[in-house]
Image (cartoon, rainbow, N blue to C red):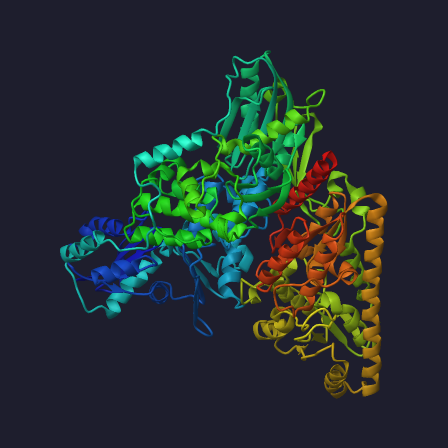
Amino acid sequence: MNVYLGIDIGSTTVKLVAAGVNDATGRLEILYRKYERHFSKVREKACEMLRDAKQVIGDANICVAITGSAGLGVAKASGVDFVQEVFATRKCVGTFVPKADVVIELGGEDAKIVFLTGQLEERMNGSCAGGTGAFIDQMAVLLDVQPNELDALSLKAERIYTIASRCGVFAKSDIQPLLNEGARKEDVAASIFQAVVNQTVAGLAQGREIEGDVVFLGGPLFFFKGLQKRFQETLQLSDEHAHFPELAPYAIAAGAAVYAKDTSEKTYTYQELLDTLEKTANIRVKTATLEPLFQGEEAYIEFRRRHNSHDIMRENVTMYSGKAYLGIDCGSTTTKLVLIGENHQILFNYYSPNKGNPVDVVREQLIKLYELCGDRIRIAGSAVTGYGEALILNAFGVDHGLVETMAHFKAARHFEPDVDFIIDIGGQDIKCFKIANNCIDNISLNEACSSGCGSFIETFARSMGYSIEEFCRLGLFAEHPIDLGSRCTVFMNSSVKQAQKDGAGIDAISAGLSVSVVKNALYKVIRAHSPDDLGKHIVVQGGTFLNDAILRSFEMEIGRNVTRPVISGLMGAYGAALHAMANEKETSSLISLDELKNFTHKTTSVKCGMCTNHCSLTVSMFPGGRKFISGNRCERPLGGGDKLKLPNLYEYKLNRLQQYRKSQPGKARIGIPFGLNMFELLPFWHTFLTHLDFEVVLSDVSTRAMYAQGQNSIPSDTVCYPAKLMHGHIENLLSKGVDAIFYPCMTYNLDEHRTANCYNCPVVAYYPELLKANMSHLQGVDFMMPYIELDRKKDFLKTACALFVKKYPHINKKMVKQAAEAGYAELDRYYADIAAQGKEAIAYAEEHGLEIAVLAGRPYHIDPEINHGIDRLIQSYNMVIVSEDAVAPLAEMPTVNVLNQWTYHSRMYAAANWAVHRPDAQIVQLVSFGCGIDAVTTDEMRAITEEGGKIYTQLKIDEINNLGAAKIRIRSMLAAVEEGKQNAGNA
C-alpha cells in the first residue's frame, strides 16, 4: 500500500495530511491530518508532526510533496518534491471539493483567490501580509484578547467601523483611536474581520466578480465564524453557495498529497523520510548581518552609566505633604501617570499597557493615588495628553488638555534647556520636532503608518512568547544582528520570519529590529541626510527608547551621543504635570475619591444628522451628566456650530458646484461622474452639454456606500482613493438610467502660465480608459471618452464636432461653437467667483484677527468623502479656510527645484509662497495615499514653507476617516505658532 503525504509549511503553521486510495471505490481518501503552529521552528515542527503520524503510515511506501510559503527552503535542502501552493489549492479542490466556481484561501501570511469557471485565473498576495491570519493575530494582541475571543466578540457586534487592513500598522492607526474614544470591542472585532474581507475583495479580486459557488479554505476561514459571516454578507452569498468544508485548514496539504500521488516517482520508507527531514533541521542559512551593538559587557556598563546620569529627583509619596500636580499621558498603546511635587520631583509614576480600555486603567490608578495621598497631599492641578486626551479629560474632569507634542517639548526642555531636536518614538507614532528660539520650529510625524514603532516590536515579542523587556535584552550582545532594512513593518515581518526559517537566533533578530526601527525614524519620517540635520542637543524619549538596543542603534546610526532621560517613557505625562503646575487653577476640577468609587462608563453608538456627513458617533456617558462624543468630523454634535460660520472655501466650492445639478430636459440624458477633474471642469461641461440640448445628470456626492458599490471592479489597491471612487460614481449613474456617460480623457489641463507645461496626472488624464476596461456593467453602455484638450480651443472644436455632430442629428457645428463659447465663459465666471470669495475670506480673517489655513490640495479634495471633513476640523480651531486656487493668483510663482509641468502643483507652490509672506496664514497640504507625483510636491512644499520661516503641515488621507492623527498635526502646528508669538512678545 502507498501513502501519499502532503506537508504544508506556512508562515505560522504546519499542516500534514496522509491520504490513501480506497480499494473499494478507487477514490483518494484522507487517512490522517494535523494542524499546529510552528512558532518559526518550521523544520523541527515538520519532523515532530511526521513522528506523530507514524502509526498511520506504518510500513507503507510514501510519496510526498511539500508546499507552503516556508516550504521551499525545506524542500530544496531535503530534495523532497515541492508544489506551488496555488497549484496545490487547485489539486485539492478538484479532488475533494469538486463543486466550486471560486476558491478563497487565507493562511498565516498568504491570501489567494482562484477563479475556476470562465477564464481560469489564480491570484496571490505579494510580500504584504495585510488581511491574513497574521494580521488577525496582531489585532487580537492589540485588543488584549486571544484570537478565539476576538471571534466571539465579533459575533456580538452592532456596527462596523472603517479599518484599513493592507497592513497591521495602518489598522492600528485606525483601531487605537477608536478604543481610546470608547468604541465597543465587539464592534472593533467585527470591523477587523470586515477589513480582511475588503482587503481580499479589493486587493486580490481586483475588478473580477466573486460569484457562484465559493469555497473558503485555510485556518482563519475555518476557525473564525465571525470572518465567515462578514464574507457571506459582503459577497451576498447564501448558505447554498458559501462552502466552508471540514477540510479547510488542511486543504493545501491535501492538495500536495494529491500532487504526490499524480506526479511523484520517488518513494520513501517512514524512517528514510524522517532522516531526510531531520538533516535539514540542522542546516543554517547565511543571511546579511550588521555590526554588534556592544563589543562587550564593559562597553554596555559605560553606556548605562552615561544615560543614567539624566535622572530626576524623586520623593516618596507617602512621606511628602503639600500641593502636587498630576500629568496623564493616554497614549496609543500605553497609559502613563506622573504626580510631581512643588520642586518638580516625582512622587508617583505609573506605566502600563492600556489593554484597549484606558478609562478603567486611569480610574484604577486615580483611586490608588488618592489613597496614597491621604490628607497630606492636595492635587492642585491636572493635565492630560495623548491619543485618549479628550476621553480622559471628560471622564475624570481633568483641568487641562494639551497636544502631546507640546507635552514632550516641555519635559525635554526641563532636562536639556538647550535642546534643539526632540525625537519621540511611541507605541504607534513617531514625533520629531526641531527647536529654534526656544519654541517648536518644525514638526514631523509619521503619517498613517506606524512602521517601526514600539507596538510592532511588542507584538512580535509577544507572538514569540517574550515580554518586550526580555526580547530587547536578548539583542544587546548579539554577535551578528540580522540586517532587516528600513521597510514597512509587514514586509519587515516577512523578513523576520524568513530569517528565523534560515536559522537566525532570537538575539540576532532582536538587535536587527532595533536597527530597523531607528532607520525608519531617521530616513522615512525625519528624512535626515546627515546628523547635522538633527542638531547638537538631541533628546530622545518615548517608551521605545527605554530599549537600550534601540538607543544604542540610534547613536551608532547618527554617530553622536544623545540625551535619554531616565523617565524616557514618562516624558509625555511629566510634561503634562509641568503644564498643570504652570497653569494652576484656584480649584481643580479633577473628580474626588468618592466619585471615582461610584464611577460608571457606558457607551452608545448613534448616527449624527446635523449635516450631510452623517457621522457615526460614539457617545460615552459618565456620572454627573458628563459625556464625551467621538467620531464627529465637525463641532456641531458638540454644540460648537458658531465656528462653522467662519468662511470656508472648501464648503463654498462644493455648494457652488452643486448648483449644476439643475438641468432642463433635453434630447438625451447624459451622465457626468462627479469626481476627479470634473470637480473643476464641471461648469464648462455642464454648460456645454446643456447648450447642445442635453439633460445633464450628475452622479451623487461621494459616500462610503458608493465606494463599496464599485469596489469589486477596482483593479489596483494602490491607486488613490479619489480614483477608486470613480467606479462607484459610474455605478451610480447607471442606476439613474442615463442614455450615455460622458467622461473624456484629458492629457492636458488648462494653462495658467505658471509652468513649463500643463499636464494632468496620469490617473486624472486616462482613468476613463481603465473604467471602460474593468467595469463589466459598462458593456453595451454608450460610454463617451474622447481625448480632448480644452486649452487648445480650435483643436477642441474639431474634436467636439467630430464626436457630437456625427453622433447626434440635431447638432451642427454652429451649435458646438456657441456651446463651447458659453462653456468657457461659465468656467471663467466660476474661477472669478472663487477668487472673489477668497479675497472676502482673507478680509474677514484680517478684520476679526483670525488665523488663515491655506488648505492646499487638488480640486477633488473638496469632496467630503475624500477629505473626511478635515476642513471643518481645522475650522473648529477658529481658523478661516481658503483653498490653493483662491490664493495662488495673489502670489508670484516661487523658484522650485523640479521641472514644474503640472497645473495643480503650480497652484500649490504659489499658494505656499503666498502663505509664507503673511503672518496670519499657515499652509496645510492634503495628500492622497497612492499619489506618486505628490512625492515630488511634498518635498517642494516643505522647502517653500520652511525657507519662509513657517511650519509645514501635511495630512495624508485615504478611505479611512479617523482624524486622530490629523488633529495632532493641526493642534501641534497651532500650539507651536502660539508659543512662537508668546516668545516674540516676551522678547
For residue 406, side relative to residue 112 (left or right): right
Query: Residue 193, percent across and down?
Result: 51, 50
For residue 713, side relative to residue 691 (left or right): left
Above or below: residue 420 compared with residue 338 = below
Above or below: residue 683 compared with residue 135 = below
For the N terminus, the image quarter is bottom left
Report the front residue among 491 and 838. 838
For residue 371, side relative to residue 642 (left or right): left
Above or below: residue 343 compared with residue 780 = above
Q: Residue at x 49, y 32 (%)?
A: 565
For residue 370, side relative to residue 880 (left or right): left
Query: Residue 811, percent across and down?
Result: 80, 85
| Picture quadrant where residue 120 is located | bottom left
| Picture quadrant where residue 268 is located | bottom left
Report the front residue among 712 and 442. 442
Q: Residue at x 39, y 32 (%)?
A: 304
Can residue 120 be seen from the camera position used here?
A: yes
Can residue 20 be seen from the camera position used here?
A: no
Above or below: residue 986 compared with residue 225 = above
Query: Residue 125, percent across and down?
Result: 44, 61
Query: Residue 332, percent across and down?
Result: 54, 39
For the C terminus, the image quarter is top right
